[in-house]
Amino acid sequence: MNLNRAQLIGNLTKEPEIRTTPAGLSVASFGVATNQTWTDDAGQKQTRAEFHNIIAWRKLAEICGQYLHKGSKIYVEGRLQTREWTGQDNIKRYRTEIIAENMIMLDGVKRDTAQPPQEPMPQEEEEIKVEDIPF
């Protein structure tokens, strides 16, 4: 049995970068920071940030590009994948990324402040009679 699963709750470190592959697939890349807090032996509170590289594909990439911004708090889950390549200096390089399969925005959707809020659609209210309530 094998399991390759990553789950994070953190904040975006930069705006998502959206690209399109030659085959027409959308891909988004962005960073998420998570913090670990503990008390050391001297009783002092310590914090350490960990930075994660996230890649989202297809419709999820489009959603990330449309709704996520630097500082957004999100939950992301996916799988770990390590890429390897040789740099221009002929040194082999590695990068471990989380390939996102699901994402939940934890701080809600923020409206674009450049556009005024739209008026809600008027809804017809139907009168409810006490005798129509089934309990």
Image (cartoon, rainbow, N blue to C red):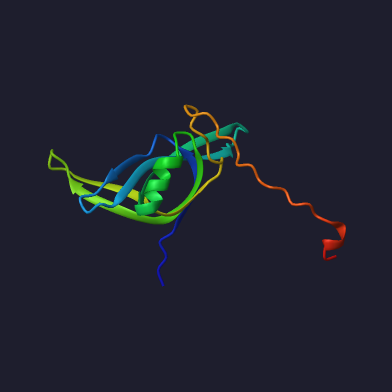
Q: Residue furthest top?
A: 114
Residue 124's x, y, as percent? 68, 47
In the depicted view, which residue is nearer to us: 17 or 113?
113
Q: Residue at x 32, y 48 (%)?
A: 27
On the image, the x and y values in percent for residue 72 come to 49, 37
Specify whether 44 is left or right of 4: right
Which is nearer the eye, 83 or 108? 108
Residue 99 sits above or below residue 52 on the image? below
In this rendering, the count of numbered labels is 0
Query: Which quarter shows the N terminus?
Result: bottom left
Q: Residue at left 22%, top 54%?
A: 23
In the image: residue 88, left or right of residue 34: left
Residue 134 image-quadrant placement: bottom right
As drawn, the residue found furthest toward the right would be 131
Specify whether residue 122 is in view: yes
Percent of width and height locating residue 58: 34, 53
Residue at 43% in and 59% down? 5
Considering depth in this image, is 32 or 123 the residue closer to the camera?
Answer: 123
**Residue at image coords 72%, 48%:** 125
Q: Quadrant of the C terminus?
A: bottom right
Q: Nearer the viewer, residue 89 or 13?
A: 13
| Residue 51 in view (yes/no) | no
